[in-house]
């Protein structure tokens, strides 16, 4: 009975948060002169085949960004620099793939390794500053985000190829482009095959975190550095490794799009995924499977935002309001759930200790 109650309570928290967010957003729309009914109708309508493909592709990139954030959060580290890490990693991967140093799939594998290495190295800067100088990773990663924008802009302007009014890296050769697959009609776009990177990363995240000594040390350090040190764990080493892993996963964020549709770094690069990933990691409580559902939810809301503007005349910023309220509501809901669970456990323990309780006595 207790287990069933815990499952119901755990599911109720995010559901209530989403309902609350939709209610708040509807009130905002109604006050601003829009139609809350149109908003609800469009949000809950089934997307077209093309939008379903877009939702899947967006969810893949958001999921990878959220996993990168979750690694840090489980270690009690706030890696706010995912945006910069996947930016420099995406540029590096595009340059390596465009150079076509190796043929075919080997070129793809080399670019993936380059992205992981560059993303990890960029996050490693903040990690080294944290363990050697005590600099907060929040401050250093935010500053590194700004540096990443400037650095990639400079490299693109200096070494990129001019295409009209913009610049781009050398396009990936056709032999290294990764074809997608289309589960729907021929007219819709394709699901990126490198979306499998998200599946691999998610499974690895769960296995390492829950089935290895390293994962136990990481979680223990995040919950209590004092207890971790007492058990012989080097917190500085764990901080460095966790940030490197976080940055390496962040390096994968844009690769499905690069090899599946963009084929170069330039005007096709999608920004903002890093910050969205942080919100999704919080919504998914830093756990692999809940993060996947949260990534799908955010991708779904993003995909429906264009319909809100076209069909109902509602600004796309409304979706950002919805996402923000969802995150805030989830934080509050989970805290309420935690308090309820503690209270329920205390009540059950007190009930078990009462005279005449039906609980079995343990023989001495």
Image (cartoon, rainbow, N blue to C red):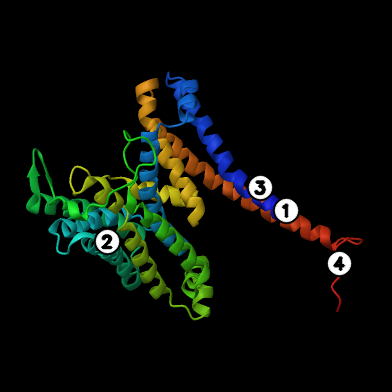
* Closest to the observer, 201 or 216: 201
Crowding near pointer 1: few (<14 within 10 Å), some, many (20+)? some
Quarter holding residue 240: bottom left
Label at residue 360 = 4
Relative horizontal placement of residue 231, taking residue 235 as reference (left or right) = right
On-image quarter of the C terminus: bottom right
Looking at the image, residue 226 lies above or below residue 271: below
* Closest to the observer, 107 or 68: 107
Q: Helix or strand or loop: what does disc 2 sit on?
A: helix
Label at residue 164 = none
* Closest to the observer, 160 or 204: 204
Q: Is residue 320 visible?
A: no
Q: Helix or strand or loop: what does disc 1 sit on?
A: helix
Question: How much space separates mark 2 and mark 3, taking CA atoms?
Answer: 41 Å
- Image mark count: 4
Q: Is residue 90 visible?
A: yes
Mark 1 lies on residue? 344
Mark 2 lies on residue? 112
Which one is earlier in the sequence, the residue at label 2 or at label 3?
A: 3
Label at residue 8 = 3
Which one is earlier in the sequence, the residue at label 1 or at label 2?
A: 2
Question: How much space separates mark 2 and mark 4, taking CA atoms?
Answer: 58 Å
> Which mark is nearer the camera, 3 or 1?
3
Looking at the image, residue 140 lies above or below residue 328: below
Which one is earlier in the sequence, the residue at label 4 or at label 1?
A: 1
Crowding near pointer 3: few (<14 within 10 Å), some, many (20+)? few
Residue at the spot x=88%, y=60% of the render? Answer: 357
Residue at the spot x=70%, y=50% of the render? Answer: 5
């Amino acid at each position: 009975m207790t287990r069933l109650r815990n499952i119901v309570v755990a599911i109720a928290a995010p559901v209530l948060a989403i309902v609350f967010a939709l209610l708040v957003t509807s009130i905002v729309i109604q006050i601003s002169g829009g139609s809350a009914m149109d908003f609800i109708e469009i949000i809950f309508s089934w997307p077209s085949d093309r939008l379903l493909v877009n939702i899947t592709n967006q969810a893949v990139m958001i999921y990878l960004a959220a996993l990168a954030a979750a690694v840090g959060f489980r270690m009690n580290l706030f890696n706010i620099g995912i945006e910069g890490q996947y930016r420099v990693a995406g540029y590096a991967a595009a340059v390596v793939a465009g150079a076509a140093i190796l043929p075919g799939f080997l070129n793809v594998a080399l670019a993936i390794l380059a992205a992981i290495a560059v993303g990890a190295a960029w996050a490693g800067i903040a990690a080294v500053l944290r363990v050697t100088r005590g600099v907060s990773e929040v401050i250093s990663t935010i500053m590194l985000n700004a540096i990443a924008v400037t650095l990639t802009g400079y490299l693109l302007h200096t070494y990129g190829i001019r295409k009209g009014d913009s610049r781009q890296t050398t396009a990936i050769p056709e032999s290294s482009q990764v074809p997608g697959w289309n589960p729907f009609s021929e007219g819709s776009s394709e699901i990126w095959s490198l979306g499998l990177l998200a599946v691999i990363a998610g499974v690895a995240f769960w296995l390492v975190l829950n089935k290895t000594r390293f994962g136990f040390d990481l979680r223990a350090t995040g919950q209590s550095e004092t207890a971790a040190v007492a058990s012989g764990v080097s917190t500085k080493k764990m901080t460095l490794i966790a940030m490197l892993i976080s940055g390496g996963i962040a390096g994968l964020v844009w690769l499905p799009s690069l090899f599946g549709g963009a084929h170069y770094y330039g005007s096709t690069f999608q920004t903002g995924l890093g910050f969205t990933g942080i919100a999704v990691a919080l919504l998914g409580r830093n756990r692999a499977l809940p993060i996947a559902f949260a990534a799908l939810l955010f991708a779904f809301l993003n995909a429906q935002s264009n319909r809100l503007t076209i069909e109902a005349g509602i600004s796309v910023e409304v979706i950002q309001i919805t996402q923000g309220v969802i995150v805030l509501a989830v934080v509050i809901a989970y805290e309420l759930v935690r308090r309820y669970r503690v209270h329920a456990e205390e009540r059950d323990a007190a009930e078990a200790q009462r005279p005449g309780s039906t609980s079995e006595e343990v023989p001495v």
